Image: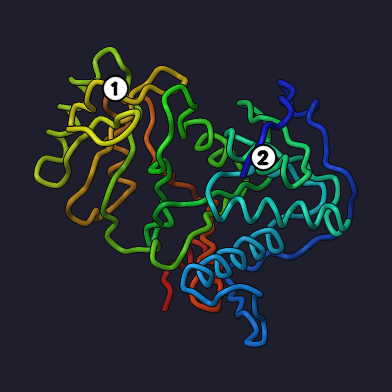
Amino acid sequence: MEAVARASAATSAQLRPCPRPRRNRSLPSSSVLRRPGRRRLACSASAADADVVDLFDAAKLTVDKFVKSGMVVGLGSGPASALAVQYLGTRLRRGSLTDIVAVTSSVLSASEADKAGIRANSYQEGIPIDFAFTDAEVIEEGTLAAVIGRRKTESGEPSFMLEKAMVKSADKLAFITGNDKYLTGVEGSIPVLVKSGNWIDTAEEIDDLFLGDAEVWRRPSFGTAGPLGGDHPLVTKEGHHVLDVIFTTPIPDLGQVAEKLDQIAGVVDHGIICSDQSYAVIASKGEVQVIEEKSSVIP
């Protein structure tokens, strides 16, 4: 989703709204959108194509259900978020949404906003966000806790920390993902940002904390490497290393993992997002479900 967006002002008063206004949509606590059977794309009907169509439907529903004229909207990163940004740009050009102030938190989301013709501002702490959306690598059924930051970044790029800060500051937040990533008992990597100076001590403390349940690997800047990250470890723009805490057994509670990581001195941040104001927009074959924590089990 991305090209370079204009730098934002330090305060929300300086944010510039996107051109052209109109229209509100109500937000149900949960809903299902089924794609009409007659809808077809003029492309091959491969599984990959179908997945893109499903994600587009989820992205479209996210904008239609949550975004209202006059809002400050946080634009997240990932394939589904890119589709949502494109669709948001379409609605702005048509005039069915107006006076939207768009805020980005990454080079990717800024690029997508630029391609969609959306004037955007870079997120800064203290900017009030009415609604934000982003991709989730996985969502925990029952709590809607989500994991971001698994996607590969390059050395010198900002980490997921700014995106997490943006979406957590929003009054409402929607995670967009596929049905296969909406799980009970999450497994796989939890990215953890750590201070570079004593990263080995921090890694050992994390390893002891989850002994037998997870492995701790320092992320390399390119290719693959052993647990130490090889000779070229990834260093973020903020100067931190990224540890991938790879759970080999299902995690019973993502929130508890987040609390334990927060208590470790060398941990700067992690990719777990827990929010009382979060929704999950789940794309599956031919339908999209919008779920909130009160009704977060898909039958």
Q: Which residue is mark 1?
A: 232
Work out whether residue 63 or residue 53 is closer to the camera in this orientation and state it: 53
Q: Residue at 24% of width from left, 53% of height from top? A: 251
The amino acid beneath tag 2 is: Ile
Is residue 207 rendered to the left or right of residue 79? left
> Residue 107's image quarter?
top right
Callout 1: helix, strand or loop?
loop
Residue at the (66%, 29%) spot, across then down: 122
For residue 37, above or below residue 43: below
The answer to which of 167 and 48 lies nearer the viewer is 48
| Residue at figure coordinates x 61%, y 64% from the top left | 56
How far across and how far down the image is residue 213, in percent?
A: 14, 47
Counting residues from the start of the chain, the first of labels 1 and 2 encountered is 2
Residue type at mark 1 is His
Tell me the quadrant of the picture where the N terminus can be found. Answer: top right
Q: Which mark is residue 272?
A: none
Please count the marks in the image. 2
Question: Residue most toward the top?
Answer: 197
At mark 2, the secondary structure is strand
Residue 157 located left or right of residue 95: left
Residue with the most extreme bottom position? 37
Could you tell me residue 57's position as x and y percent? Answer: 62, 68
Crowdedness near tag 1: few (<14), some (14–19) or many (≥20) residues, C-alpha within 10 Å: some
Looking at the picture, does residue 161 appear above or below residue 55? above
**Measuring 20% from the left and 35% from the top, which residue is drawn there?**
216
Question: Residue 3, percent across and down?
Answer: 66, 36
The location of residue 239, given as percent across then percent down, is 41, 17
Residue at mark 2: 129
Quadrant (top left/top right/bottom left/bottom right) for the C terminus:
bottom left
